[in-house]
Image (spheres, rainbow, N blue to C red):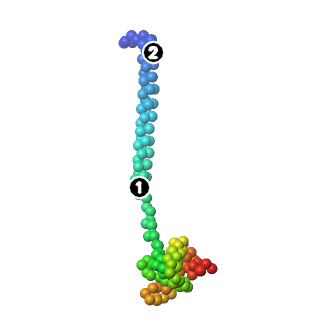
Amino acid sequence: MLFPVSEVEAARTVASGKQVKSAVRPAAKVSSKTRVATATKTKRTSAVAAAPVFRPPKPPAQRHYAVDGTTFYADGVRVRAAGIDSLEMAGASGIAKQRLQQLLDSGRVSIEPLGNEGGDTVARVKIDGRDLSELVSGR
């Protein structure tokens, strides 16, 4: 033996070495794994969050505008509904116009052109498959 070491000092040195190793190394391993895992997770999350979501454009809203009780505009074309008799009484045209607008807004409108008359397109108009003339008259 080169250096005389007492048994007490030897035991302290061994014990303190083990305490240091167990206290430092596992903490370093855990923290390094945590850091790597955290960095990986944040990269994945940020890559997913940064990716743009493709959404097709919405079709333009198609609204028909009533002119009077029988006529309305559809995509800039003046359409007169076939099969509807217009009331020519004072005040009745405003009510008829409101009723036509409510019907046009109530569902899907399909227009089947029949011909032209005086600058208007005469057409058979259906709302959700039902003829407009039936809806107006209440049949």
Kindly identify the amino acid type of the residue bearing the numbered disc 2. Ala
| Position of 1 relative to 48 (above/below) | above
Q: Residue at x 52, y 83 (%)?
A: 89
Q: Residue at x 42, y 28 (%)?
A: 24
- Where does the image place residue 93, in percent across and percent down from the top left? 50, 79
* Quadrant of the image containing the C terminus: bottom right
**Label 1 to label 2: alpha-carbon separation:** 60 Å
Q: Which residue is mark 2?
A: 11
How packed is label 1: few (under 14 Cα within 10 Å), some, or many (20 or more)? Answer: few
Q: Residue at x 41, y 49 (%)?
A: 46
Viewer-closest of 5 and 59: 59
Q: Considering only vertical position in the picture, is 117 above or below 31?
A: below
Of 45 and 72, the residue lying toward us = 72
- Helix, strand or loop at label 1? It is loop
Residue 124 visible: no
Q: Quadrant of the N terminus?
A: top left
Residue for badge 1: 51
Expressed as whole percent of the image width and height from the top left, the position of residue 86 reads 52, 84
Q: Residue furthest front?
A: 90
Residue 51 position in % (x across, y down): 41, 55
User: The residue tagged with tag 2: helix, strand or loop?
Assistant: helix
Give the amino acid type for the residue marked by disc 1 in the picture. Answer: Ala
Horizontal side, residue 125 vs residue 60: left or right: right
Which picture quadrant has residue 138? bottom right
Judge from the rendering whether residue 127 lies leftward or rightward of residue 57; answer left or right: right
Q: Residues within 10 Å of mark 2 (few under 14, many from 20)?
A: few
x 44%, y 89%: residue: 118
**x and y percentages locating residue 104 in the rendered image:** 52, 74
- Circles 1 and 2: CB atoms closer than 8 Å: no
Q: Earlier in the sequence, mark 1 or mark 2?
A: 2
